[in-house]
Amino acid sequence: MKAIQFIAPGQPPELREVDKPAPGPGQVLLKVTAAGACHSDDFVLNAPPGAFAYPLPMTLGHEGVGVVAAVGSGVKAMTEGTSVAVYGPWGCGTCHRCAQGQENYCLNAAEQSITPPGLGTDGAMAEYLLIDNARHLVPLGDLDPVASVALTDAGLTPYHAIKASLPKLVGGTTAVVIGAGGLGHVGIQLLRHLTASRIIAVDVTEEKLAFAKEVGAHEAVLSNADTVAEVRKITGKAGATAVFDFVGYQPTLDMAMGMVGVFGDVVIVGLGDGVAAAKVGFFSQPYEVSVRAPYWGTRSELIEVLDLARDGVLHVATETFSLDDGVEAYRRLAANDLRGRAVVVPD
């Protein structure tokens, strides 16, 4: 079968022929109907050698949906022909976090070498995908696979990030979204639907700011040396109640810390270069500011996100590519030349 694989650090991915997997006991084989390309993939592809101990070559794709093609012995929860979404942050299933559905924070994953598909285990950028356990699948129902695949990360990640701040985002508050790209534009939609906050989008081009307003931002501010002052003009003395940084580089994080108000949240969602740090101390930010760096989301939250999509709340902007053209999707991703998310659809 065809698969897009990570071959070596610093090199572009390659379309290759690999063996079709077969499900063992407890496993499920999916015929992939859509796979999403993400900036996390680009981060991994260009990380220094040794930064990630992934077995190479490795099939990319941690966003995946498909149809159950075969099941291993002992699998009763899934039947062939069922359309499903893949819950990506796999855990051990038995630790305290996993028992609460928080496999994204599994306590044993590192020790037991449990890794997500596409981020340590062969992923969805292929004709078929092997799933380790049926609990990592969520029925897709009547949702369109191509329109829904990015929700497994680009929907789930901002939903998880925003959900913890919802008690603060009441009438009269302000939420700032830095970066209106693949995750940020979904975050804006979620904030518009789930909160009464005024939403301010911040990005580097007028085109992206126009896009942010299309999907629900009330205000749009260009990212430059004056951004903090411009946002402060809108928020007044109160500052922002929550700032969601979907970029994650030091300049955007510094910007977030400059915008947030007393009792506010700064939520670092974007991976950036992986080393951005918030300056925190008694005299460094307003009183009682909370800084969080969440990771992905829970299985129950993925179900909630898919339900929101079913209700027509979420629309992920996508550009589609065939599997044969999937390497081009990654080139466009690296060049920041996409409006929304890149989705690869196997032939």
Image (cartoon, helix red, strand yellow):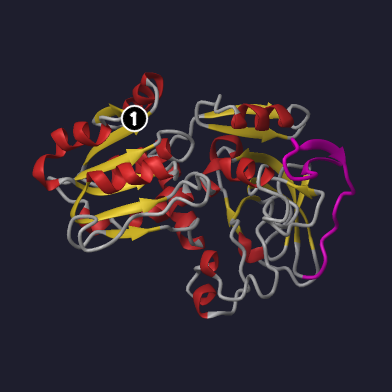
The quarter of the displayed image where residue 71 is located: bottom right
Q: Is residue 12 magenta?
A: yes
Q: Is residue 323 above or below residue 195?
A: above
Q: Is residue 147 above or below residue 264?
A: above
Q: Residue furthest left?
A: 237
Q: Quadrant of the C terminus?
A: top right
In screen coordinates, is 231 left or right of 80?
Answer: left
Image coordinates of residue 248 in percent, x first then y, are: 44, 45
Image coordinates of residue 250 in percent, x first then y, are: 41, 45
Q: Residue at x 9, y 44 (%)?
A: 237
SS type, badge 1: loop
In screen coordinates, is 197 left or right of 67?
Answer: left
Q: Which residues are magenta?
A: 1-25
Between residue 67 and residue 302, name the one nearer to us.
302
The quarter of the displayed image where residue 94 is located: bottom right
Between residue 273 and residue 95, name the one nearer to us.
273
Image coordinates of residue 329 in percent, x first then y, are: 66, 29
Q: Quadrant of the N terminus?
A: top right
Q: Residue at x 48, y 58 (%)?
A: 295
Q: Residue at x 46, y 46 (%)?
A: 270
Q: What amino acid type is highlighted by mark number 1? A: Ser
Say which residue label 1 marks.
223
Q: Residues within 10 Å of mark 1 (few under 14, many from 20)?
A: many
